[in-house]
Structure formats: structure tokens, C-alpha cells
Amino acid sequence: MGDMAEYYLQQGMDNYASGDEDWEGIVSSGYGPRPKTCRQCHERNLWWDFQAGKYRLIDAAGKLHVCPSPAAKDAFK
């Protein structure tokens, strides 16, 4: 990694460790996590969440995303 990349990485890690990082500002500025699209049913505006030891897609209300039809799951076999 280049010198400048290492410098900026270290600055970000220092801010994170000290608690100075303003995550709300990062998200609202467009540089934070972005909504995802389900690969199987193509539903949009989903988010990754860590639940029960796994990353799972959830909707904006926090409900676990379940594809509407079982045929969508068989599309990639």
C-alpha cells in the first residue's frame, strides 16, 4: 500500500478508536453503507445485518428479507 493510503487508513482507525468518528455524518453525506438489491428476487432497498451469527438482508423496518417465491431460490441451481 502506498504511503498516503496508509496515512489515511491510520487516520480513520485513530478516529474510530477514539470515538471521534461521526458515523451519522458519513451516512447522511452518501459515503456510508448503501442499500442493496437481492440477487434472487431483485427486491431493492435492503440492508445487511448480522443476525444469529450470519449476515442477512433486512428491509428498512428491520424485518428479515424472505424472497416471495420458492422458484426464485432455484434459479441459480
Image (cartoon, grey):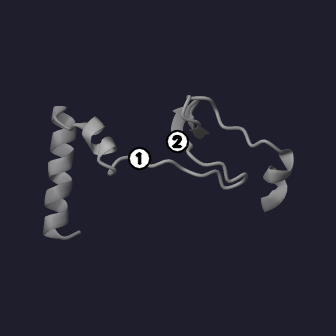
Q: Which residue is mark 1?
A: 33
Q: Is residue 51 above or below residue 68?
A: above
Q: Estimate the x, y position of residue 32 in percent, counting from the top left.
A: 35, 47
Q: Is residue 4 above or below residue 41?
A: below
Amino acid type indicated by mark 1: Pro
Q: Estimate the x, y position of residue 36 in percent, counting from the top left.
A: 54, 50
**Mark 1: few, some, or many residues within 10 Å (few <14, many ≥20)?**
few
Residue drawn 58% across the image and 36% down it: 59
Q: Is residue 41 left or right of residue 21?
A: right
Q: Kindly tell me whether residue 77 is visible in this rendering.
A: no
Q: Kindly tell me whether residue 68 is visible in this rendering.
A: yes
Q: Which residue is mark 2?
A: 48
Image quarter of residue 74: bottom right
Q: Estimate the x, y position of residue 63 in percent, counting from the top left.
A: 62, 29
As helix, strand or loop, the secondary structure at mark 1 comes to loop
Q: Is residue 35 left or right of residue 44?
A: left
Residue drawn 18% across the image and 70% down it: 2
> How many marks are shown on the rendered structure?
2
| Residue contact at pointers 2 and 1, CB within 8 angstroms | yes
Q: State the quadrant of the N terminus.
A: bottom left
Amino acid type indicated by mark 2: Trp
